[in-house]
Image (cartoon, rainbow, N blue to C red):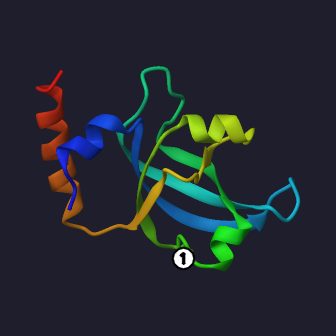
Amino acid sequence: MLEIDILVFLCAVIMGKVVGREASAAGDQWVRLALSVQAVYKRAPRSRLRRGATALHVRAADLACKCPKIKINKSYLILGVEKEGVSAGFPGLTVGERTLLLEWRDDWHRRIRRLQRRAINCH
């Protein structure tokens, strides 16, 4: 499922747990989720993305159609491009068109670390 090609082209690969939900200050178009970043597998060179608490913004229309289906107190593998959040004008991370949210599986940690080691040799 997870290929090395995917990790090479993405700017951000993180594992985070959704710990809360609230309406965004931008009105009804966005929903702000409280995200606890548990592991950062890949990030852009000048990224401020670190472990700890951050905001995750998702379009309300996307949540209404359950695409992505996000549950509170569940961990997710988030694969995406960090620029999407900056262009939307929100602090933290933003789920855009090119972002993947996959419910976390325990056996992925070792697999992702192995892909990280292989990706280092690709440059």
In the displayed structure, would residue 40 be above or below residue 102?
above
Whole-percent x and y of residue 110? 16, 54
Residue 67: image x %, image y %? 55, 72
Tell me the residue at 24%/67% (across/down): 106
Side of 56 relative to 111 (left or right): right
Q: Nearer the viewer, residue 29 or 46?
A: 29
Nearest the viewer among 119 and 53 is 119
Q: Which residue is denoted by mark 1 in the rendering?
A: 71
The residue under the point 48% across, 62% down is 17
**Could you tell me residue 82's position as x and y percent?**
53, 37
Query: Which part of the image, by quadrant, shows the C terminus?
Result: top left
Q: Secondary structure at mark 1?
A: loop
Residue 75 quadrant: bottom left
Q: Residue at x 73, y 42 (%)?
A: 90
> Mark 1 belongs to which amino acid?
Lys
Which sits in the foreground, 80 or 51?
Answer: 80
Q: Position of residue 8 (x, y in %)?
A: 27, 36
Considering the image in quadrants, where does the N terminus appear?
bottom left
- Please identify the quarter of the rendering in which residue 95 is found: bottom right
- Residue 71 appears left or right of 55: left
